[in-house]
Image (cartoon, rainbow, N blue to C red):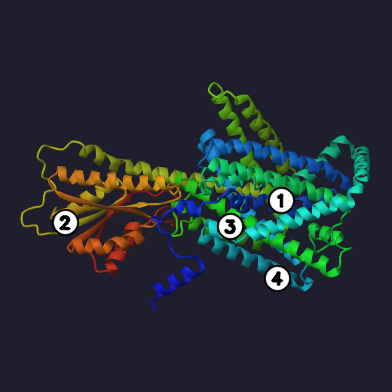
Amino acid sequence: MSGNNFFRSVKHVFIGRSRDLTEHGLFHKLSLVAILAWVGLGADGLSSSCYGPEETYKVLLAHPPLALFVAAMSAITIALICASYSQIIALFPSGGGGYVVASRLLSPAAGVVSGSALLIDYVLTIGISVASAMDALFSFLPPEWLAWKVAAGSAGIVLLTVLNLRGVRESVVIWVPVFFLFLITHVFIIGYAFATRGAGFGALMTDTAGSVHAVSSEIGWVGLLALLLRAYSVGAGTYTGIEAVSNGLPILREPRVRTGRRTMVLMALSLGGMVAGLLVAYLLVRVVPVDGKTLNAVLFEQLTAGWPAWLGSTFVKVSLSSAAALLFIAAQAGFLDGPRVLASMALDRWMPARFAALSDRFVTLNGVLLMGGAALLVLLLTRGDVGLLVVLYSINVFVTFSLSQLGMVRHWWLVRREEKAWRQRVAVNAVGLGLTSFILVTLVILKFHDGGWVTVLLTAALVAVAFGVHRHYEDVRRKLVRLDDILEATKIVPAHSRELAPPAGSGARTAVVFVNGYNGLGLHTLLGAVRMFGGGFRRFVFVHIGVVDAGNFKGAGEIEHLRTHAAAECARYVGFVQQRGGEAAAVTTIGHEIIAELEKLLPDLTAQYPDAVFFGGQLVFERETFFTRLLHNYTAFALQRRLFLRGLPCAVVPIRITRPVPA
C-alpha cells in the first residue's frame, strides 16, 4: 500500500469519507433541527451551570443568603439577552453573529473588534469547558488520580478536534443522550431539593434580610452593591453561550429564523432555570465547598445521603459523569462557531484566506485545527485551573454583546420611519445594551488585576494582527489594479482581428489555461502563455474550478449559482479568443479543493487534448516571507507539481508583486 493510500485509509477511519456536492439533500442532512442545535450550541450556556453558580456562591460564602439576589439577577439577564438576540436572528437570517452584526450595523473596524473578541472567547470556551469537565469527573475518582487531570483534558481536546473534523452533525448527534441525561438528573436534584427542603424557604428569606442588614451596616450600601456585583460578575460566564445560536444560524435547518428562535427559547428556559435553581438549592441545603470536589458534587452527595448507599453513589456518579460529558458538548460551541467567525473574517480579508476553505467533509478544517490547538495551549498554560479560566473567559463575550446591541439600537433608529414597531424593538435592544455594557465595565474593573488584563491584551493583539492582514491584502489588491487595465484594453477589438489565430503549420498544440474568473489576472496568464510560445497554439481551453468555501456553502441555491457563475466567466474567455480569430473551449466544475478537482478532470483533458500545455498564473513576491506564505496560496505551483508527476508540461506565468508588505 502506498503512503498516500495508507494516509487516505486512516483519514477515512477517523474523519470519514469525502462528501459529494451532488448528494441529494446534502444541506438538509448536514443541518441541525432545534433540538440538535440546542444540544450543539445551547450546551455551552447550560454547561456553565457546572461552574458559574459555584463561582458566584464562593464569593458570598461569608453571607450565602445574598446569592438569592444574584439568582434573580442572573435569570433576568438571561431572559433579556435572549430576547434581544431573537431580534438579531430575525434581522440576520443567514447568520447574525457578533462579527457580522457589528460590521454591517456599525463599521468594519467595530466588526473586527467584535470578531477578535469572539475568537478569543471561543478558544477559552473549549478550554474552560474541558477543564471543568475534568473537575467534575475527578470529583468522584480516587484522589491519587488527580495528577492525570491535565493529561486527560488534553486528550479530550484532541478527541473533540477529530470529531469536529468529521462534520457538524456527526459531532453533535452522539452527545444527545448525554445532554438529556444531564438535564434530567440536574432538574431532578433541583426539584428534589425544593421538595425536601422547601420548608426552609421562610427561614431563607429571613436570613437574606438579616444578611442585607449585616453587610450594609458593616460596609455600607455601596459596599453591599459592590459585593453583589462581584458575585454577579464572577458568574458572568453563564451568559457566554447565548451568542452562539445567532452565530450558528447557517448550520440550522430551514426555516432558519424559526429554528433559531426555538433554540433560543429552549436555551433561555433551560439556562435560566438551571442557574437560578442551583443557587437556591445551595442555599436550601446550606452546602459548603469541599477540596477536590465541585459544589454540585457536594450538593448531590448531601441530598442523596439518606438514600441506600448503592443508589446514592450510582446517582451521584451518573450525574457528575453526565456533567463532565455536557461540558465536552459545550466545547462544541467553540468548534462550531469559532471557525465560522474566522471564516467570515477571512472572506472579508481580515484573516488569512485559507481559513475560509472547506475540507472534503465540508468543514472549515484550518479553523477547527486552530481552535483545537489554541485551546490545548490554554489548557496546558493554565494547568486546567477553572478559577483562572473563569477570569479570562467572561470579559470578551460582553464586548461582542455590547457592540451587537449598539448596532441593533442604531439600526432601529435609522429605520424608524419604515418600521412601525421600532419603539418596542429599540427598547429591547437598548435595555440589552445598558445591561451588557454595565456588566462589561464591571468585569474589566473587577477582573483586570486578577488576570483579566491577559484577555484584554490578547484581544488587542489579535485586532492588531487583523488590521495588519487587511492592510497587506489591500496593498496587494492595489498593486494588481494595473492588471485590470488589460480588461479595459480588450474592450476595443479591431475589426477582423486575427491576433490569436493559429499560425500556418502550427500543428495541433493546445494551451490549457487555469483561470479563477474573468479578470486581469486570467488575461495576463493567457497573454503570457502566448508570449512564451510565440502564439503557436491551435486552440485555447479555459479551465475554471469554482471553489466551494465557507462564503458560498449555504444551500443548494448558492452552489448552483457558483456553478452558473463559473460557466459564465469561462464563456467570456472563449468569446475573447474567438473575437481574435482563435479557437477556444471551456471546462468548468466546482469543488472544495482545486487539486482534487484537477485530478478528476485530467483523464478527460489529456485524452481529448494529448498535446496540451498547461498554464497557471501565480502571484510572486520579490521577497518571500512567512507572512506572504501564510496569506497567499501557491496553487499554480501545486498544480504544476501534480502535472509534472504525470509527465505533463506546465508553465507558471508570474505576476510580480514588487514590494511585499512587512509582517
In the image, is 605 to the left or to the right of 366?
left
Q: Mark 4 or 2, which is nearer the eye?
A: 4
Report helix, strand or loop for mark 4: helix
Whole-angstrom CA distance, mark 3 to mark 2, is: 55 Å
Which residue is the site of mark 4? 148
The picture places residue 322, in percent across and down from the top left corner, at 71, 61
Residue 84 visible in the shown view: yes
Quadrant of the rendered image containing residue 358: bottom left
Which residue is the site of mark 3? 172
Report helix, strand or loop for mark 1: helix
Amino acid at the residue labelled 3? Val
Disc nearer the start of the sequence (2/1): 1
Task: Determine which of the numbered discs, if any, sits on residue 520 in the image.
Answer: none
Whole-angstrom CA distance, mark 1 to mark 4, is: 24 Å
Whole-angstrom CA distance, mark 4 to mark 3, is: 27 Å
Residue 447 visible in the shown view: no
Disc nearer the start of the sequence (1/4): 4
Amino acid at the residue labelled 4? Trp
Contact? badges 1 and 3 (CB < 8 Å): no
Whole-angstrom CA distance, mark 2 to mark 1, is: 64 Å
Whole-angstrom CA distance, mark 4 to mark 2, is: 65 Å
Q: Mark 3 or 2, which is nearer the eye?
A: 3
Near mark 4 (Cα within 10 A), the count class, few <14, some 14-19 or many ≥20, is: few
